[in-house]
Amino acid sequence: MSIVKINVLNVPAEQREILEKRFASRAGAVEGSDGFEWFELLRPVEGTDDYLVYTRWRDEESFQAWMEGPMKQAHQGGEAGSERPKPAAAGSTLWSFEVVQQAAPKQG
């Protein structure tokens, strides 16, 4: 079964809009990556400043290939000589999971 990677981004309230705009305007390289299955950006509702960036992959190898290729290129960003924008997140942690069970709505 698939694997799930959740990047936990600690985003101060004043940076939330910036983070969401950056994700909205992202190049979209992940959608075309081999083994990519799903993406969601989850905004906190209460009790935390942590956003969750949820991605699901066919396998660990697919995720690592994306990390070393398109993701690395996207985060180097900017043109030669231009200054990279300050990160919107104050910190991040990566959680990794294997999907052991899943369900979808019943077709009725």
Image (cartoon, helix red, strand yellow):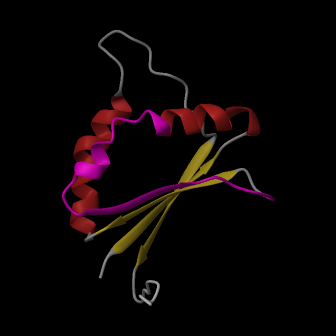
The quarter of the picture where the N terminus appears is bottom left
Which residue lies at the image location 41% right of the left edge and 69% below the top edge? 4
- Identify whether 25 is placed above or below 34: above
Q: Position of residue 28 (x, y in %)?
A: 33, 41
Q: Residue furthest front?
A: 108
Out of 106 and 104, give the one closest to the viewer. Answer: 106
Out of 26 and 72, give the one closest to the viewer. Answer: 26
Q: Is residue 14 left or right of residue 83?
A: right
The quarter of the picture where the C terminus appears is bottom left
Taking the magenta stretch, the answer to whether it contains residue 38 is yes
Q: Is residue 79 left or right of residue 17?
A: left
The total number of labels drawn is 0
Which residue lies at the image location 26% right of the left edge and 58% below the top edge? 64
Which residue lies at the image location 37% right of the left edge and 62% below the top edge? 38
Taking the magenta stretch, the answer to whether it contains residue 16 is no
Out of 11 and 42, give the one closest to the viewer. Answer: 42
Quadrant assignment, res 61? bottom left
Quadrant assignment, res 25? top left
Which residue lies at the image location 35% right of the left edge and 29% below the top edge? 76
Q: Position of residue 3 (x, y in %)?
A: 35, 73
Q: Residue furthest left?
A: 34
Q: Which residues are magenta?
A: 24-47
- Identify whether 85 is placed above or below 107: above
- Identify whether 86 is placed above or below 31: above
Q: Residue furthest right?
A: 47
Quadrant assignment, res 12? top right
Q: Position of residue 53 (x, y in %)?
A: 51, 55
Q: Is residue 54 left or right of residue 35?
A: right
Q: Position of residue 75 (x, y in %)?
A: 37, 34
